[in-house]
Image (cartoon, grey):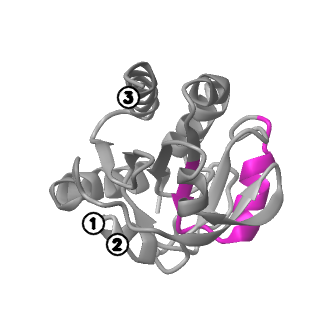
Amino acid sequence: MTLRNLACTFALLAASAASAALKAGDAAPAFIAPASLAGKPFTYSLQEGLAKGPVVVYFYPSAYTAGCNIQAHEFSTKADRFAAAGASVIGVSLDSIERLNAFSADPDYCAGKLAVASDGDGRIARAFGLRVSGPQAGAIDTRGKEIDHGFTERTTFVVKRDGTILAAVGGVSPEANVARALELVQKLAAAR
């Protein structure tokens, strides 16, 4: 499968599942998942993240794919601005923790500033109302390596400290997705 075909698959996922995703006011499903930051694995807990402030939970199709590379880079370069608004960010995909260890440390993308979690069976994505597709035969990443896992669409949830969803952001470019998430957490901080 070419990168163009893979992009079309992601676009179809986004269009078909956007209406099913959890919405503002819904309770965000608590989850615990293996994660990586700067190439070091750890266990991520949404409840622990919310104890410190709002959490931006962003779902993305796969590490080392064009849009996901852009989105991770945007989140990492704006990490200080999210922190200044009192928010943390966790990326979630169906990638293995081994792929995420490399992605989280990659200076061009997560750059050691962005934690990413592995949702290998898609359980977390489904709990947020997102559609999950299976592996795509012949799919390769931007490094030329096979992608051997399923995908979910690019959707970002801003979760307030009380565990409810402030907003869901989907159906926009990776750059616009990050910009909108930042705008939402900054407004939330200003309202405190």
Q: How far apart are marks 1 and 2 (CA)?
A: 5 Å
| The one of 130 and 144 positioned closer to us in this rendering | 130
Mark 1 belongs to which amino acid? Gly
Q: Give the range drawn in magenta.
A: 90-107
Q: Is residue 102 magenta?
A: yes
Tag 2 residue: 126
Mark 2 vs mark 3: which is more N-terminal?
A: 2
Task: Name above or below for residue 86 compared with residue 24.
Answer: above
Quadrant position of residue 168: top left
Mark 2 belongs to which amino acid? Arg
Q: Tell me the residue at 29%/68% (across/down).
A: 131
State left or right for residue 127 relative to residue 66: left
Quadrant position of residue 29: bottom left
Q: Do the residues labelled 2 and 3 touch (CB within 8 Å)?
A: no
| The one of 12 and 44 positioned closer to us in this rendering | 44
State left or right for residue 13 relative to residue 15: right
Q: How far apart are marks 3 and 1 (CA)?
A: 21 Å
Mark 3 vs mark 1: which is more N-terminal?
A: 1
Tag 1 residue: 129
Q: How far apart are marks 2 and 3 (CA)?
A: 24 Å
Task: Name above or below for residue 67 compared with residue 164.
Answer: above
Residue 136 visible from this viewpoint: no
Determine the secondary structure under disc 2. helix
Tag 3 residue: 184
Determine the secondary structure under disc 1. loop
Q: Quadrant of the C terminus?
A: top left
Query: Outermost residue, front direction?
Result: 192
Which mark lies nearer to you, 3 or 1? 3
Quadrant position of residue 9: bottom left
Q: Tell me the residue at 72%/51% (across/down).
A: 103
> Within 10 angstroms of label 2, few (less than 14), some, or many (20 or more) residues?
some
